[in-house]
Image: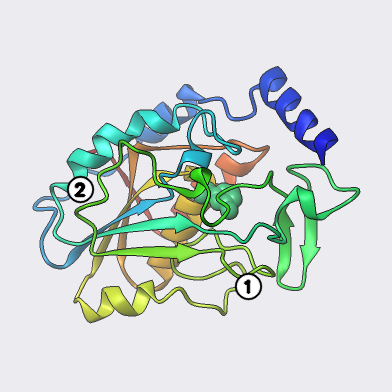
Amino acid sequence: MLLNRRNFIKTTLATSIFSYTGNIVSSVNANENKLPLNTGMENDALLVIDIQNDFCPGGSLGVKDGDKIIKNINSIQEKFNNVFLTQDWHPKNHSSFVTEYKDKEVFSSIKMPYGNQTIWPAHCVQGTKGAEFHKDLNTLKANTIIRKGFRREIDSYSAFWENDRVTATGLEGTLKALGVNRVFICGLALDFCVAYSAVDSSIAGFDTFVIMNATKQVDLPGSIDSTLESFNKFNINKVNM
Ligand code: VGL
Ligand code: ZN
């Protein structure tokens, strides 16, 4: 476990795995859709994904500059009547954690009954500082906090469906009961929880917008390419706010 953690730190420092690839994001911005007018109507919802200490610099799965988007996220929240926060919320023996395996490397992939699963450093363990929302995030406005990933055997990136694709978080039903038809998504990380949430939002029939200047990526090999492909495939709009 110690070895893995050391390797993780070494890799992170040496190759800057979480580095912000500014040119990729600016090429995305070149194709962005026009900002829809009148955001914040009753039929709009804002999802703020996983703004937790472990995904911010200094956290065990810290995304570079993950904390830099919080100020903007707070001001975006003011434009919405329906705000949902998600919180990655794992038991300490979660099956995605490298600490559960003798011979697995962090960021490698394993087969789970439901498909491929990335192995992560332990993060967002229930009741720990790392699982708490970043202190700068305004958490007062939110209708609801959606927790995910709390079943040991199943990871959950999406705010709607766990990675087995059959276990629901309940968010889809909540949004539909509220009459929401447009979903705006920001937070961490673009290429994992934001991307999966956006795809599921689109599949659920919501007009879906990812707020590109209020998200940052983990950036594992191929993860940004597949994110952008899925945005095209599922008609997900990229906007700045
Ligand atoms: C996330 C990896 C593992 C995320 C959550 O919030 O993007 N990534 N758990
Ligand atoms: Zn997680």
Look at the picture and state if 186 lies above or below 218: below
Tell me the distance, in whole angstroms, between the alpha carbons under discs 2 and 1. Answer: 30 Å
Where is residue 107 shown, x and y percent of the image?
73, 43
Q: Residue at x 14, y 59 (%)?
A: 81
Q: Amino acid at mark 2?
A: Gln
Residue in front for this viewpoint, 88 or 22: 88
> What is the basis of the colouring in this image?
rainbow
**Relative horizontal placement of residue 72, taking residue 234 as reference (left or right):** left
Q: Inspect this view and state whether residue 229 appears.
A: no
Residue 67 visible in the snapshot: yes
Query: Dot 1 corresponds to which residue?
Result: 164
Residue visible at 78% across and 29% down in the picture = 6
Q: Is residue 149 above or below residue 122?
A: below
Residue 106 appears at what percent x and percent y? 76, 42
For disc 2, the neighbor class at 10 Å (few under 14, some 14 to 19, many from 20) is many
> Which quarter of the rendering shows the C terminus?
top left
Horizontal side of residue 154 vs 119, given as left or right: left
- In the figure, 141 relative to 34: above or below? below
Q: Nearer the viewer, residue 230 or 128?
A: 128
Q: Amino acid at mark 1?
A: Asp
Q: Quadrant of residue 35?
A: top left
User: Please, which residue is most extreme toward the right here?
Assistant: 103
Residue at the (43%, 70%) spot, across then down: 203
CB at mark 1 closer than 8 A to ligand 2?
Answer: no
**Lower position in the chain sequence, tag 2 or tag 1:** 2
Name the residue tied to disc 2. 77
- Between 37 and 69, the one lying in front of the other is 69
Identify the image quadrant of the N terminus. Answer: top right
Q: Is residue 74 left or right of residue 24?
A: left
Local secondary structure at mark 2: helix
Nearer the viewer's eye, disc 2 or disc 1?
Answer: 2
Q: Position of residue 140 (x, y in %)?
A: 21, 52
